[in-house]
Amino acid sequence: MLLTEGVRESGELLEAKHTRLLRQGEKNCWIEIVVDEGKNRHIRRMFATLEIEVLRLVRVAIGEVKLGELSRGEVRDPYTPRSEEIGNEQAKVN
C-alpha cells in the first residue's frame, strides 16, 4: 500500500509502519494504521495527499500502552495495569 511506502507533503516524508483494511462499505472504510512517529496531523496529511477525506480518527494505543475504554479527557496511570492486562500476563506465564 502506498501509505507504507510514504508520501511527500510539504517536503516531509509521511509514512505508515503497517496498514490493514478492517471494514469496507460502499461509501467508506475503516483502516488500521500504525505509525512510528505521529507528526502533526500525520494521518490526515497522508490521506489529503491522496485526495482521500478522513472522517474520523480513533487512537487505540500509544506505544505499548493500550488506551482501552478511556473517554475524551479521561486519564489513567499507564504504569498501573488494568485487571484484564493482569489476566493476560498470568496466562502468558502459565
Image: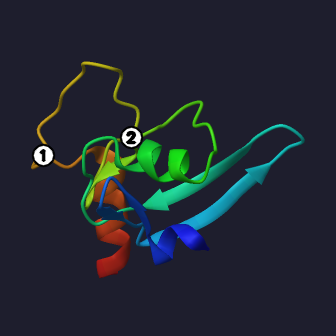
Q: Position of residue 57 (x, y in %)?
A: 49, 37
Q: Which residue is mark 2?
A: 68
Q: Horizontally, is 31 left or right of 16 in the view? A: right
Which quadrant of the figure contains the C terminus? bottom left
First reached walking from the N terminus: tag 2 or tag 1: 2
| Numbered disc in front, either 2 or 1 | 2
Disc 2, SS? loop
Give me the residue at 25% from left, 51% from top. Answer: 39
Q: Position of residue 12 (x, y in %)?
A: 29, 61
Q: Position of residue 53 (x, y in %)?
A: 62, 37
Give me the residue at 25% from left, 43% from top. Answer: 40
Q: Position of residue 14 (x, y in %)?
A: 36, 62
Looking at the rendering, which quadrant does residue 76 occupy? top left
- Of residue 21 and residue 47, the one placed in the foreground of this image is 47
Looking at the rendering, which quadrant does residue 7 occupy? bottom left
Q: Which residue is mark 1?
A: 80
Give me the residue at 49% from left, 59% from top. Answer: 33
- Of residue 60 and residue 53, the one placed in the foreground of this image is 53
Q: Name the amino acid, label 2.
A: Gly
